[in-house]
Image (spheres, coloured by chain):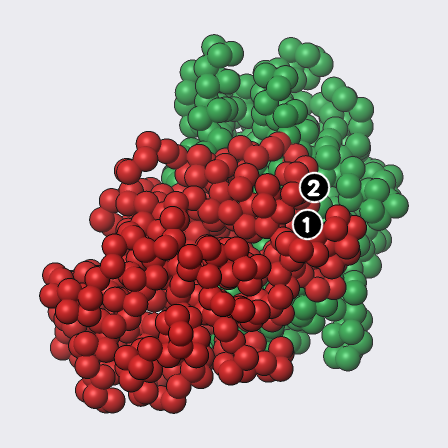
Chain colours: A red, B green
Amino acid sequence: MKAYIVGVGMTKFEKPETRDWQYWDMVREAGTAALEDAGVRYDQVEQVPVGYCFEASTAGQRAVYELGLTGVPVYNVNNNCATGSTALMLARQFVEGGSSDCVLAVGFEKMARGSLGGGTEGGGGFASSPVARHYGIMAAAHGFEMSPPTAQIFGNAAREHMQRYGTTPAQLAAVGAKNHRHSVDNPYAQFQDPYTVEEVLAARTVHDPLTKLQCSPTSDGAAAAVVVSERFVERHGLGERAVEIAAQAMTTDTGASFASGTCIDAVGAPMSRAAARQVYESSGLGPGDLDVIELHDCFSINELLTYEALGLCGEGESGKLVESGATTYGGRWVVNPSGGLISKGHPLGATGIAQAAELTWQLRGEAGPRQVPGARTGLAHNIGLGGAAVVTLLRR
Amino acid sequence: MKAYIVGVGMTKFEKPETRDWQYWDMVREAGTAALEDAGVRYDQVEQVPVGYCFEASTAGQRAVYELGLTGVPVYNVNNNCATGSTALMLARQFVEGGSSDCVLAVGFEKMARGSLGGGTEGGGGFASSPVARHYGIMAAAHGFEMSPPTAQIFGNAAREHMQRYGTTPAQLAAVGAKNHRHSVDNPYAQFQDPYTVEEVLAARTVHDPLTKLQCSPTSDGAAAAVVVSERFVERHGLGERAVEIAAQAMTTDTGASFASGTCIDAVGAPMSRAAARQVYESSGLGPGDLDVIELHDCFSINELLTYEALGLCGEGESGKLVESGATTYGGRWVVNPSGGLISKGHPLGATGIAQAAELTWQLRGEAGPRQVPGARTGLAHNIGLGGAAVVTLLRR
């Protein structure tokens, strides 16, 4: 039984404390938008997977009770930065497996201001994650200081990429410039200001070579998606709203994450490559079939690493690829038309579902000034250290 | 595609700090036991839902990486005290839906000593759960002081039951005496000491009328179950090990949890009743068909409330039922042969899977001195405030 996304919604992603809201307020807003987009009532929803990292147990119930007290199963899930797509992965399986015809996948995060890696309560994200110690030890072994842990690890991966392949600081900055430029047309984005490559390079260094404009910010926000069966689409005449989940895969760490001792492998490039391969194999599609991509640019280097993992270019060629313009409007693909994590923002639990929301709008031709012309096939890539990578292929 | 449990394993449940172990040590022990019980290797496992409440995000990966680095999907789930059965519910759906033939469901908790409702890191369990405030406010409205929150809420529900139905302190104590007596024969139980009803009544009062021997303790422990498809059972000749998951349902709060303003409803009796009804309807079985039951006796009153919710007796008759001996060896059903949460212990994330482990042993006739003679059909009931109730029907 094929699964379709028929409705998506999200809040504007915002710097924490911009609005006086609680996480359940965000979920009410995003969930209501998704249901309205689908033309589905909450009492038609049969199961609700909810993703978040930083709240206590059963926060998902507290949040979705805002949409209704219908007594349906609620699953609270987490997978660090891949949490949102983990909820989506459950929704797809519930529908494909025939246990439900209509599932609402929700993701949210209310993050303490300036605390990527340490939330409002509980959790603590990657900084306190069980595998963080391993990465920390490995970074120490490479002679790098501990600064904000995720920025350090990705910064170290960037240095490795520069040393190994001759990637330049300007190529890394080109990712930031591209994604900030894209976000100008996205009203849901936390930032909507364009920057030149020079401006990105000149911004404050977070962990060399990564500057602030190449790093995802701390964000509040929520996103939701209504996932339904083919039968539900037909019964309710939702064909015009429906985007097919053509393939999806989650991978976790294997020996490859740790064995090589490189930061490129430690930040999950092997997981991304494996998840992409699974999705290409099961769909019979390849990178050449994609029109639009939302990928996990938590830091500019990860967009480059992911170009290679997804097969958009060969190993070590990603710096040249972004510089060539192949991954923006007018190029072979548009990568991160939403502005990506760097400029749209990155509320951990929401990100994976927000990626699916952007692709849904793009594939329906509803993305307004940031529309990728003629987009029919889209790919979402969401990764969390610790770890999990989820790749999702959507098709109209 | 029917789903079967073919292997189960658990650690001994223990008072925190009894052993010098981390949560991943527990999971290695319980997971290895479950795989060996099934005769399945970890590299045959296709997906891994992991339940816990008190650790940071992706603790599931850290734990199951001890069993192997195979790269399979890992889902970290929580649902307060119903967390373990939430993981089991995912495993069942993955198998029934055909997305996997072999899934390992895992649950664990490493709880700070003496801190039911406040864990080792992050989370914080019910005390900090989003719905706790509601219960707290409601309890305050009834004029009860705040003590350990869960004990208070359940104690208040016990007072209501006494006022409304004439239930006696001795009947409540009979639950504790029965479950402590059962645990004498369970080497996995945290306590293995028998107590008379008089001794249970004379123990320290936690929240009147509940004494210490009627309350589940703070516990460390893990449990795991291998859930496979009918096809997998046949291909690997596992028919002798296989226990069918005949039906399963999860319910969350509806208006009924809050509307009446009674503590009996607030502690989840309506959720339990609804989940039981769904399971009876989908299986075509009823309370009269059950032989053995593992139910969520976090406090003695909840065992009584659950007798009524499961339809073992009429409303208000549960005190008389336990006193009659109908729920112990020689009676109509054996309820909590393991010793239940009260005496076996209650490491939140592990409990739901440990219940399934006990039933699996019982239905296979492998429960040794605590074997329920001729047990063929078993029911597990797991509930978490905040909230979710999961009822699972197992059959040989």
* Image quarter hosting the N terminus of chain A: bottom right
Identify whether A161 is placed above or below B17. Answer: below
In the image, residue B127 above or below residue A9: above
Near-viewer residue (A377 or B68): A377
Q: Quadrant of residue A343?
A: bottom left
Give, as a three-letter code, the residue at label 2. Gln
- Dot 1, how many residues are within 10 Å of its Cα: few (below 14), some (14-19), or many (20+)? many
Say whether residue B87 is visible: yes
Rounded to the nearest angstrom, the CA distance separating label 2 from label 1 is 7 Å
Q: Is residue A151 above or below residue B140?
A: below
Residue at (42% x, 60% y) in the render: A370
**Residue B94 at x, y percent in the picture:** 66, 63
Query: For the point 57% across and 59% down, which residue is it?
Result: A364
Q: At x 32% / y 45%, what residue is drawn?
A: A14
Q: Position of residue A388 (x, y in %)?
A: 45, 67
Q: Secondary structure at mark 1?
A: strand
User: In the rendering, at what x and y percent does residue A325 appear?
Assistant: 33, 77
Q: Amino acid at mark 1?
A: Cys
Q: Are marks 2 and 1 in contact (CB under 8 Å)?
A: yes
- State the mark number for residue A102: 1
Identify the residue at horizontal 33%, vertical 32% (top origin). A20
Q: Which mark is residue A44?
A: 2
